[in-house]
Image: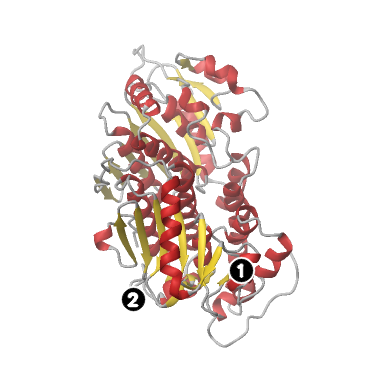
């Protein structure tokens, strides 16, 4: 099955998007019969990857197509239920890699909602109008303000530990203590209570911001939404940019977009990704959308392609000019494109693939595209003429720009240069305002190694073949450890700590074995746990 991440509000099966001036409403009303794969029903507003694909599409359209929207209210269209979280039958039946990619994409979408609140002036508010469990509460936690209906039955809960033998896999534990600042002993009690908490107790513990009786619920939600809108700096009269369908060709050999090409080598288990420069004024947004779509499709549909090789092609001056305009653009749209590119680079940072950049003559690894190389685990540069034209005077080079010193930070809040040279002063590198050739790039530590044209083909072949011989699991763990040097943030804890544990727990018999909690949930049989702590 090939998963597509294309969506449009006209074709949503699970969400309703309604825009009312400066307010927007995202109403979750899941179609039980419309799971992305057969074999389960999406009861009680539970969700799967298909539900989250629509949510991601909606959050993107709100940022780009609706600049006047200042507050987004997330609520439910069903009676007395907000969201029951990730569908248990789906999780129990899914392969390990499906579960992992599902949790990762869901996390990234939640992080995107928080990013919109922090950087776009588009605040998310959760109107919890019914029972709210597991991933449903995690959806609410991604919002800036949580209003819970006080109807003597609706509660918020994270029941994964007591009921399913797993963890709240989309950041629940981390957001409760790091974002909501719930005291850790109370968080322990809360996360081991399958029934959760409701009413004033939920407010007292900091699990929600306020509880409101049903008769005043809609009124208070609108008041809070308007209060948040008044604090926003988003323009009231700007015209949005439509996110039209991407130009894309897909076949057995790869995926080709307008500016991004991906070619598969299934024998070596790799894909070569080439990003092309352009002077087209829409290039920054289009190339960002294409990279985003490609990363998602490869992660989900091509799990056997474990090595991604990045290349660029085109005029470096074109990239520099595009970047200069983008960084100087103080409009709401310039802000959105910059933060979108930042989020796509972050998506690459947490992708469980070996990432290698090849810098050759004809490349345009400068500034914002050089960030792609710095996101990679290794960078190799050719010191010599093009392999197919030894008489050419063209040589490979890279160039640092302001784009490498702040606009596109990693999830840990520092730049990729700061991560690369952790503990060192990278300010000295900002003085390099010209192209850097292969020898100097290697001396400065900006690349892993420079190979001459005689050795290039063999050395790169050895690198790629060597990668293909190693354990994918060991490589994933190694890369995740190396990429996030330095401080921890809520975001890095979610990906590097919580999801790492969740991925391990998903493989354990206590959760996924024939007598595990995921398998036996809803059958009337109790899970049988191996009591050894390991």
* Residue at image location 50% in from the left, 22% down from the top: 451
Residue 419 lies, with reference to residue 304, above or below; the image says above
Residue 297 lies, with reference to residue 132, above or below; the image says above
Residue 306 shows in the view: no
SS category of the residue bearing label 2: loop
Q: Are marks 2 and 1 in contact (CB under 8 Å)?
A: no
- Left or right: where 50 falls relative to 205: left
Residue designated by label 1: 202
* Residue at image location 75% in from the left, 67% down from the top: 533
| Front residue of 383 and 219 | 219
Give the Cα separation between the discs numbered 2 and 1: 33 Å
* Residue at image location 74% in from the left, 74% down from the top: 531
Sequence-wise, the earlier of marks 2 and 1 is: 2
| Front residue of 20 and 178 | 20
Residue 210 x/y as whole percent: 55, 64
Residue designated by label 2: 33
Quadrant position of residue 221: bottom left
Residue 529 x/y as whole percent: 68, 77
């Amino acid at each position: 099955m090939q998963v597509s991440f294309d969506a449009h509000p006209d074709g949503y099966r699970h969400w309703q998007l309604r825009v009312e001036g400066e307010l927007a409403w995202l109403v979750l009303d899941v179609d039980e019969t419309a799971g992305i794969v057969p074999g389960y029903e999406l009861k009680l507003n539970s969700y799967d990857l298909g539900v989250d694909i629509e949510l991601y599409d909606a959050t993107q359209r709100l940022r780009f197509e609706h600049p006047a929207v200042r507050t987004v209210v997330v609520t439910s269209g069903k009676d007395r239920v907000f969201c029951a979280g990730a569908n248990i039958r789906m999780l129990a039946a899914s392969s390990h890699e499906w579960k992992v990619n599902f949790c990762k994409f869901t996390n990234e979408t939640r992080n995107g909602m928080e990013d919109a609140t922090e950087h776009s002036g588009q605040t998310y508010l959760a109107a919890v109008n019914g029972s709210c469990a597991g991933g449903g509460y995690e959806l609410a936690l991604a919002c800036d303000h949580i209003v819970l209906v006080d109807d003597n039955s609706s509660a918020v809960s994270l029941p994964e530990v007591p009921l399913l033998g797993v963890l709240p896999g989309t950041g629940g534990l981390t957001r409760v203590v790091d974002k909501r600042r719930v005291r850790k002993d109370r968080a322990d009690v809360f996360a081991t209570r399958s029934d959760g908490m409701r009413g004033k107790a939920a407010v007292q513990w900091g699990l929600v911001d306020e509880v409101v009786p049903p008769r005043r619920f809609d009124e208070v939600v609108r008041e809070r939404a308007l209060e948040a809108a008044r604090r926003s700096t988003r323009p009231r009269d700007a015209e949005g940019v439509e996110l039209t369908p991407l130009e894309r060709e897909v076949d057995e050999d790869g995926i080709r977009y307008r500016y991004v090409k991906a070619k598969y080598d299934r024998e070596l288990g790799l894909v070569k990704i080439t990003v092309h420069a352009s002077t087209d004024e829409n290039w920054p947004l289009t190339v960002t959308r294409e990279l985003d779509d490609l990363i998602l499709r490869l992660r989900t549909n091509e799990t056997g392609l474990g090595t991604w090789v990045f290349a660029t092609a085109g005029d470096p001056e074109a990239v520099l000019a595009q970047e200069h305009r983008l960084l100087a653009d103080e409009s709401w749209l310039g802000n959105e494109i910059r933060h979108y590119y930042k989020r796509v680079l972050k998506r690459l940072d947490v992708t469980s693939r070996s990432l290698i950049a090849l810098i050759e003559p004809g490349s345009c690894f400068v500034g914002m595209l050089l960030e792609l190389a710095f996101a990679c685990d290794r960078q190799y540069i050719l010191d010599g003429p093009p392999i197919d034209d030894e008489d050419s005077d063209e040589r490979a080079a890279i160039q640092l720009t302001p784009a490498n010193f702040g606009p596109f930070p990693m999830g840990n809040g520092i730049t990729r240069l700061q991560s690369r040279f952790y503990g060192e002063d990278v300010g000295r590198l900002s003085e390099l305002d010209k192209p850097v050739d292969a020898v100097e790039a290697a001396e400065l530590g900006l690349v892993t190694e420079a190979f001459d044209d005689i050795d290039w083909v063999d050395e790169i072949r050895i690198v790629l073949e060597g990668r293909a011989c190693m354990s994918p699991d060991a490589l994933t763990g190694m890369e995740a450890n190396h990429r996030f040097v330095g401080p921890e943030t809520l975001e890095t804890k979610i990906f590097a700590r919580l999801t790492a544990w969740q991925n391990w727990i998903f493989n354990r018999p206590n959760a996924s074995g024939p007598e595990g909690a995921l398998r036996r949930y809803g059958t009337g049989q109790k899970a049988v746990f191996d009591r050894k702590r390991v």
